[in-house]
């Protein structure tokens, strides 16, 4: 049902499945995804939480919960979910990247950069992590290091306009401070 873009119908089906067997963590995850597609974000958060309460080892569910919380600006809660995803799957580069972003968004920029570097160590071709590291470095006024990070992101994904824009912003900052 989800593949046919019928989130409302999927929600009904997953709800019925969970009425019959509320211990099905995968059904809670799918229900959460359908609810999120419908804009029922708080219901989705509740469903993701039920899934990870049943199966704390579901790294993807922790990750999805973290992304949902981050979309609401609830960065500290999102960080905890990304940490749980990494506890369940230590080599989860996307979770390390998103943890780095979440930490930076609530003022823990240095800790965030450590997670972004972890993401890069796990997946050196993760252009987003290089870009996010560049943004974190730039926020600390470390322009030269930020430029290096943005250049690496562009090397990996040369067609992303936002990466070129970030590099241009840093280069203009460097020129204006000279």
Image (cartoon, grey):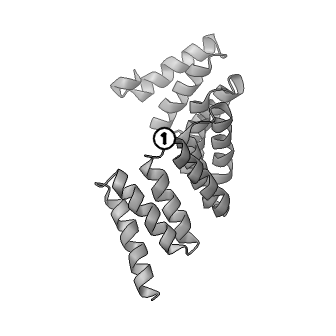
**Direction from residue 65 to residue 33 in the image, left or right:** left
Residue labelled with disc 1? 39
Tell me the SS state at disc 1. Answer: loop
Picture coordinates of residue 81, whole percent (x, y): 65, 41
Q: Residue furthest top?
A: 20
Task: Count every numbered label the image shows and give the total.
Answer: 1
Picture coordinates of residue 24, whole percent (x, y): 62, 16
Picture coordinates of residue 116, whole percent (x, y): 57, 52
Q: Can you tell which quarter of the image residue 109 is in?
A: bottom right
**Direction from residue 133 to residue 5 in the image, left or right:** left
Q: Residues within 10 Å of mark 1 (few under 14, many from 20)?
A: few
Task: Tell me the residue at 49%/21% (across/down).
Answer: 12
- Is residue 72 among the parts visible in the rendering? no
Residue closest to the eye, 162 or 148: 148
Point out the image quarter for the N terminus.
top left
Task: Tell me the residue at 39%/68% (across/down).
Answer: 167
Picture coordinates of residue 160, whole percent (x, y): 32, 55
Residue closest to the eye, 35 or 104: 104
């Amino acid at each position: 049902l989800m593949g046919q873009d019928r989130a409302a119908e999927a929600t009904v089906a997953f709800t019925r499945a969970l009425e019959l067997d509320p211990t099905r963590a995968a059904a809670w995850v799918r229900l959460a995804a359908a609810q999120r597609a419908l804009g029922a974000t708080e219901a989705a958060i509740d469903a993701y939480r039920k899934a990870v309460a049943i199966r704390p080892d579901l790294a993807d569910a922790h990750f999805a919960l973290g992304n949902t919380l981050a979309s609401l600006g609830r960065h500290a809660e999102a960080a905890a979910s990304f940490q749980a995803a990494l506890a369940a799957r230590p080599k989860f580069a996307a979770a390390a990247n998103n943890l780095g972003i979440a930490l930076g968004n609530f003022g823990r920029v240095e800790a965030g950069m450590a997670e972004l570097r972890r993401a890069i160590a796990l997946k050196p071709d993760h252009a987003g992590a290089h870009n996010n590291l560049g943004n974190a470095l730039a926020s600390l006024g470390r322009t030269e290091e930020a430029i290096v990070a943005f250049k690496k992101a562009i090397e990996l994904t040369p067609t992303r306009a936002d990466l070129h824009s970030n590099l241009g912003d840093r280069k203009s900052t460097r020129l204006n401070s000279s």
